[in-house]
Image (cartoon, rainbow, N blue to C red):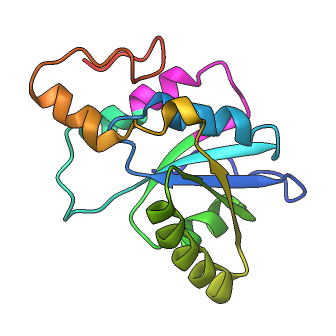
Amino acid sequence: MAPEAVPHPSLRIALFPGTFDPFTIGHESLVRRGLQLVDEIVISIGVNEDKKTYFALEKRLEMIRNLYRNEPRVKVGSYDSLTIEFARKMGAKFILRGIRSVNDFEYEKTIADMNRTISGIETFVLFTEPELTHISSSHVRELLRYGHDVSAFVPKGMVLG
């Protein structure tokens, strides 16, 4: 489910792809910092039928759209194709990714090289702020499954229920 309007071709648009199950304060930090570098960010939820998620796709879209309802430079959509195909559809020339560790770097570099080779779309990475490196959606999901309060790990005002 893509955002409605196709943007002006001169805008610097970055796709920020992920599962965002759930969207964390680490993701929020990357969006905030990414907006200093580009005109618009499209938070893009990739649909992977093999991945068991905690929140349904529509709920994740709703939570993130609600969080950014007052930020016109942030769009939210979902896709079930290659990330670069959705990037082209949205007019994005860049892919934004975050790196927490050396392991993340190796993984992201391989994908970025592949994407650039087949599409010309550049990936830029932002290093996670040191105080947020321990936060991951998978850890937050585990806490949720056991009924733990996760308010310290998700953006203020994000309603998970």
136 or 119: nearer the viewer: 136
Name the spot of residue 134 as percent of width and height, x first. 40, 37
Extreme-right residue of the structure? 10
For the record, the magenta segment spans: 62-75
Q: Left or right? Give the position of 121 relative to 51.
A: right
- The count of marks equals 0
- Position of 153 relative to 82 (above/below): above
118 or 33: nearer the viewer: 33
In magenta segment, residue 68 = yes
- Viewport quadrant of the C terminus: top left
Q: Left or right? Give the position of 36 relative to 108.
A: right
Name the spot of residue 137 as percent of width and height, x first. 34, 40
**Residue at 17% in and 52% down:** 52
- Position of 70 relative to 144 (above/below): above
**Residue at 29% in and 62% down:** 48
The answer, for residue 41, to whether it is visible in the render is yes
Quadrant of the rendered structure where residue 122 is? bottom right
Extreme-left residue of the structure? 146
**Residue at 11% in and 30% down:** 145
117 or 105: nearer the viewer: 105
In magenta segment, residue 91 = no
Extreme-top residue of the structure? 157
- Position of 109 relative to 135 (above/below): below
Quadrant of the rendered structure where residue 117 is? bottom right
Extreme-bottom residue of the structure? 117
The answer, for residue 4, to whether it is visible in the render is no
Q: Left or right? Give the position of 152 relative to 42.
A: left
**Residue at 47% in and 73% down:** 82
